[in-house]
Amino acid sequence: MRPTRTTFTAVSALSVLSLALVACGGDAESSDRDSDGPITLTVATFNEFGYEELLKEYDALHDNITVRHTKADTADNARNALRSSLGANAGAADIEAVEVDWLTEFMQYPDKFVDLADPAVEGRWLDWKTEAATTEDGQLIGYGTDIGPEAVCYRADLVGAAGLPADREGFAEFIGDTWDSYFAAGKEFVANSDAAWFDSASALWQGMINQVEVPFEEPDGTVIATTNPQIKDLYEQVLQASTADGLSAGLGQWSQDWSESFQRDSFATMLCPGWMLGVIEGNAAGVDGWDVANVFPGGGGNWGGSYLTVPAQGDHIEEAKALAAWLTAPEQQLKAFAAKGTFPSQVDALDSPELLDSTHAFFNDAPTGQILVDRATAVTMQPYKGPNYFLINTALVDALTRVDVDGTDDAASSWAKFVRDVEALG
Amino acid sequence: MKARGRPLPPQRPATPPTLRQRLTAANRRCTPYLYISPFFLLFLITGLFPLLFTGWVAVHRWDLIMGQGEFVGLDNFRRVLGSPDFWKSTRNTFSIFLLSSVPQVILAITIAALLNFNLRGRTFWRMGVLLPYVVAPVAVVLIFSNLFADRFGVINSLLDLVGIAPVRWHSEVLPSHLAIATMVNFRWTGYNTLIFLAAMQAIPRDLYEAAAVDGANRVRQFFSVTVPMLRPTIIFVVITSTIGGLQIFDEPRLYDQYGRGGADGQWRTLTIHLYELGWTQSDFGRASAVAVLLFLLIVAIGLVNFTITRRIATAGGHR
Amino acid sequence: MKTYVPLTREDRQARRNAGIDRPSWIVYGCLAAVLLGSAFPIWWSFLIASHDSTILARNSFPMIPGGNFWSNAREVMDSVPFWRAVGNSILVSTSVSLSVVFFSTLAGYAFAKLRFRGSGPLLVFVIATMAIPTQLGVVPLFQVMAQLGWTGQLHAVIVPGLVKAFGVFWMTQYIRSALPDELIEAAQVDGCSQFRTFWSIAVPAALPAMWMLGLFTFVATWTDFFWPFIVLGAGNPTLPVALQQLQAAHFVNYSLVLTGACLATIPLLALFFVAGRQLVSGIMQGAVKQ
């Protein structure tokens, strides 16, 4: 018996155990460090980008590259996850999708991202789409994927049953192209129907806020969210319509009740950017009567749309950049549009016959391609979204929800809470 | 609780120790420390250090991405305590905690009393009550938030059948707390039932026999013998559920699709507040301040519990 | 699996009670209701999971399972990295359980049976840490993981779980009562080394408690959400983290969400049917020891 040796055996056993435990977790991530051999590229998106088939295609085209796709449930969680991995300088995917609402926030840290500017892709996107992702020094943070030109989706059956014009053109004329006329039409509708006019005040808000040129922050960083009279007016207008006039179904957007309500005759219209078509089709599976009208209150409007960025912390920056460029090329974006309705931000895609001639069977064979191209041309300006846009808009949506869905506050007291929330962000 | 190890018998005396014997002795002295060191080392690194460092972060401006900023003293605490969000979260945390611990203890004792009968298929019943324990809280909350949906949830449909107006589970404060507490109770009642059952079986039979002689019926026996004898166990259960209960996160986080605890913070708890400040607003300084305050709260409650336990233990004097 | 021998006290009492406490059907009725309450939510999740997303619109109380479970399951596996999550959960829970059991037994043996300076205060320290919410150190712990470049990787979840104060306390209590000092003395007289004494005398004696500690640690780690959610992210999730990814997609399909809940519960249900008896007696034994 040699006690000391056994003791050392014990100690080394312990250390080996701990090391083994530590090491085994890392294998999956670190095994693809080798740059010559086959590599794995990770692509992180959220909601629906329509990339499933495209990534398989890319896999097949490149023998040495395996693409792994991770989809966050919501944009909120995707944003938090990206923030975390930027803070940690580790854990980000090779390609990270970023939504326009929080793009500016991440543009505060340009050195965390690879400069994607490249003569090969110059002029690929609509000017405003590229400008929004370019820093003052000319660094291009992300490649544009889709944009969200908005039309109005509606239940032709419910509208018809209320004795109102239900065909595409007649309905477009009926609701007109201002918010006032849209709400006036809504009052007429609810007088003749059990359904509400629209789903949720916060959904309408997204349409309204994207028409305000300088909503919450001045370009110099001054927060004007609580003092901007335009914001307060829109806030009161949408709540007046929602609660006092009873036009809203009072459903929290994206909630379970909201999803379920598509299966019933809960409301008649919805603002719908291109990507919303897929959402409606999924939630309303089996329901007949949806259609799309080529009109939008307040002129044109863009809701959402994203970019692909390449975080500087990745191991395969060049390959990631190449994949991002491929994914955002017009041909690929058109396929994504066909899959999930994500409307292209690429100039060449906009006049492609593939897009212009596309129709949507679920929406009564509406010429959705042509409609959305028309809606995109109607977009005349892009709001300035500062670094706090996402947080402030979240607080405002909460304010609307308190009145429209929860009924815990009236418009005035909920606004006071919003003011307080914005001050707390400071 | 006795904390000292029992002494080993004296080692063989006489003859002057050889080198090997001296090595053995040294080894014998070191071994215990070697055995406990993995625990202490790992605990210090992954448990204690982060906890203490939280205090350091709390007195600085500290951004998730940009890292440490200037020293700001108690500014973060001032801002946290000055915000109604913190107080609302504290209220919610306590309310959910009370709604989940009080009914749970009562229910668990009742079920334990039922299980304490001489049942046929004892193991079956015991395993049955423990079943929910193996469902992850995340799965529990997904299931229950479906049941508790405001418009089209089953629970409201059932209420509608018996003529009760639908409850706004996701809009109003108390109903949302009830729903969340239900999830906690679902998962933990069975677990605590078994703890109470074990304690009941440890109660000496002669106490019941004496009570029976005094003319106490079953129900009286339960209240005059069982419940008082269970007091230490009740306190134990309450203490253990305090530590976890005040940090509740999973259930309120997944109760709706946003995870912020409601548009009006109806069910926002302190841990959600901490997460929101730290990871949504990138303000690690204020998040740490919340962590420190919650820590103090839990320790304070722990101390109160401890004193009460001590008093009961010395006053009761049994065991 | 080794079956656990129930408490003798319990047995004796049961035998003594045999003639006295013959419960009426009311007792069984109440217990059946409790069981129904325990099982219903799990059954409900399976019901919804076996239909398509429109089921609740057609029927508020579907009581018969539909035939969509497997197609839903396939869709869940397509929309989140399900198998990766299962693998991660198994890896994390197993390594954490093994490590907790090993280190706790080692320390518990030292506290229970070895004499050393400072053992008293150190054990008090261990017990005190059981009451400390170490979870609240998340902010710095996250920063440590970030510094190490571990975020998004499994060791960020495994390493902080390697030891548990409760485990040390539990093993100390058990070994103190289950392992007679004479056995240790005998081993030492035979010239066994310290570690050999531990390995061949203490470990076999402590085995039942080690099993239970392992079981409970496994369940706790498998169901843990807060820390894995913060540090892992969508790319490399454990099962609960993957599960929450299902919940709030743009188009919330509750059949899919509850299919996910079902799928995540199945492994633990299986464990429950194999080792539920041990869980029951583990809890009851722990309670008596307090």
Image (tube, helix red, strand yellow):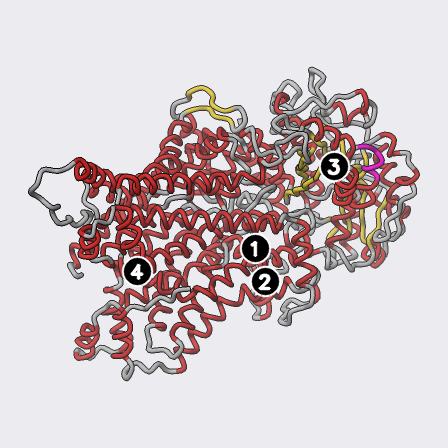
Q: Is residue C204 left or right of residue A117?
A: left
Q: Secondary structure at mark 4?
A: helix
Kindly indicate the quadrant of the structure image that contains residue B154. bottom right
Q: Secondary structure at mark 1?
A: helix
Residue indicated by mark 1: B142
Residues at circles 1 and 2 in contact by the CB criterion of under 8 Å:
yes
* Of the two numbered discs 4 and 3 in the rendering, the one whose residue sits closer to the viewer: 4
Query: At which x and y percent is residue A251?
Result: 66, 50
Q: Is residue C225 visible?
A: yes
Label 4 crowd (10 A; few <14 / some 14-19 / many >=20): some
Decide: marks 4, 2 in contact (CB < 8 A)?
A: no
Residue range corresponding to the magenta coloring: A329-334
| Residue beneath the point at 26% across and 63% down | B230
Mark 2 chain: C
Q: Is residue B254 visible?
A: no
Label 1 is placed on what type of residue?
Leu
Q: What's the mark number on residue C45?
A: 2
Q: Amino acid at mark 4?
A: Ala
